[in-house]
Image (cartoon, rainbow, N blue to C red):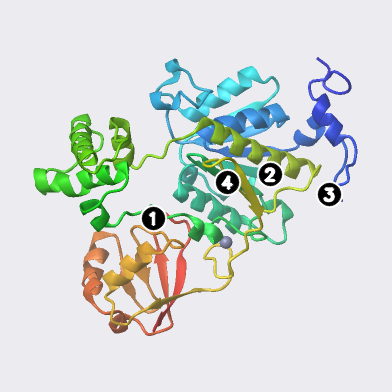
Amino acid sequence: MATTGENSRWQHLDKILQRNGPFCDDSFTSGNVEEILGRWKILVIGAGGLGCEILKNLALSGFKDIHVIDMDTIDVSNLNRQFLFRQEDIGKPKAEVAAAFVMKRVKGVKITPYYGAIQDKGENYYMQFNMVVCGLDSVEARRWINAILVDMVDMNNPESLKPLIDGGTEGFKGQSRVILPTISSCYECSLDMLTPPTAVPLCTLASIPRQPAHCIEWASILEWPRVMGEDKKLDTDNPEHIQWLYEQALERAKEFNITGVTYSMTQGVVKNIIPAIASTNAIIAASCCNEAFKIATNANPYLNNYMMYTGNDGVYTYTFEHERKPDCPVCGNQATTFEAKGDWTLQEFIDRLKEKPDVQIKRPTLSTQRKKLYYQGPPQLQEQTRPNLDKKLRELITSGEEVGITDPGLPFSLRLNVVFD
Ligand SMILES: [Zn+2]
């Protein structure tokens, strides 16, 4: 088949690329798909629900040199939506199977898989790409890749700035965004937009449940320890445990005239499973790939910079420019101020930090210029610093002093000016 001109494989895309349009960027130069996209080397992170769609779309849009990273293997539960995988692929690495499938179906595209974690690779590896598209389901992985891409930017080398397109879905909701590291708002800048898991007050669970989920939470949080004793831990992978919770929840739901408690809902609530919806993935992946195409070709303005999509009640989308946070620990240049009470113990201070949606740390190590406050490891240092956990903040630091925080989940260290109020 001819590759250019009438009746060619790319004739429709070529129509967009061979002439100027009213919205074309000044840097637009006309050409055909093969010439223009042939120059791009693009990295896709994630080969799951979004990743399958993204790989397929990029290949069908004419990108020729694609790499994909995923650390997961294929599970039977993926097969209903991760359409590049078949029954016989169960147990195999997602990145490898996805790459082979798309290459077989779309002639002329080269997809290089890597089966492993993004953290296995360093700056040298990421530097080879022109753009990164993420279809991830983990906040931690997004924070990591965002931080490394911001860190890689060298003002004297325009090539070091890699546009990051990030897609995410949760049930019927999703978002896509374009991040130009150090120029536009980064992933870390928007961390406080994440909705914390909705905690239902214990009193609601204990006294007047209103929803089926309340009955299930009641069964797992209150009834399980009461009936089974503190020693028998609830194992959410054990079908007998789930069955027990289901029966308790059903009983309670009847008592309060609540309908809708099912076994699979019980499983979903206690394991905190948010259903993955294939069509939401398709919409968000399509949006991400359109942005990749526009960035690569300059044929149309790209998203500036955040599109949210809500499919729960009808369809709603909203696009806005998310602004950079001057005190963003990744792309900002100001230390963040954190208000604390001098009377808090170091442990209380750590607990407050963990609650902050824009910090999100799990096992922090803390120090100041002058001293080690608390170290998670190695064991000797942990032992040495553990007594500090019970000390009051004012015994350890002065108001306004900078505290550096590292966490195994973070590729950067957080600097907080801790001010006593
Ligand atoms: Zn930022």
**Where does label 3 land, which residue?**
25
**Where does label 1 land, which residue?**
408
Kindly indicate whether the residue at mark 3 contacts the one at mark 2 (C-beta within 8 angstroms).
Answer: no
Counting other residues with Cα less than 10 Å from the Cα at mark 3, is it few (<14), some (14-19), or many (20 or more)? some
Q: Could you tell me which secondary element the residue under label 1 belongs to? A: loop
**Where does label 4 land, which residue?**
175
Residue 75 drawn above or below residue 206: above
Marks 3 and 1, the one that precedes in the sequence: 3
Q: How many marks?
A: 4
Q: Would you identify the image quadrant in which residue 184 lies?
A: bottom right
Front residue of this view, candidates 173 and 6: 173
Kindly indicate whether the residue at mark 4 contacts the one at mark 3 (C-beta within 8 angstroms).
Answer: no
* Rendering coords of residue 113 (x, y %): 55, 31
* Rendering coords of residue 403 (x, y %): 41, 74
Q: Nearer the viewer, mark 2 or mark 3?
A: 3
Task: Locate ligand 1 by image quadrant.
Answer: bottom right
Measure how far apart labels 3 and 1 are at the Cα level: 42 Å
Badge 4 amino acid: Gln
Q: Could you tell me which secondary element the residue under label 3 belongs to? A: loop
Q: Could you tell me which secondary element the residue under label 2 belongs to? A: loop
Residue 373 drawn above or below residue 104: below
Question: Quadrant where the C terminus lies?
Answer: bottom left
**Where does label 2 land, which residue?**
130
Marks 2 and 4, the one that precedes in the sequence: 2
Badge 1 amino acid: Pro
* Rendering coords of residue 147 (x, y %): 54, 56
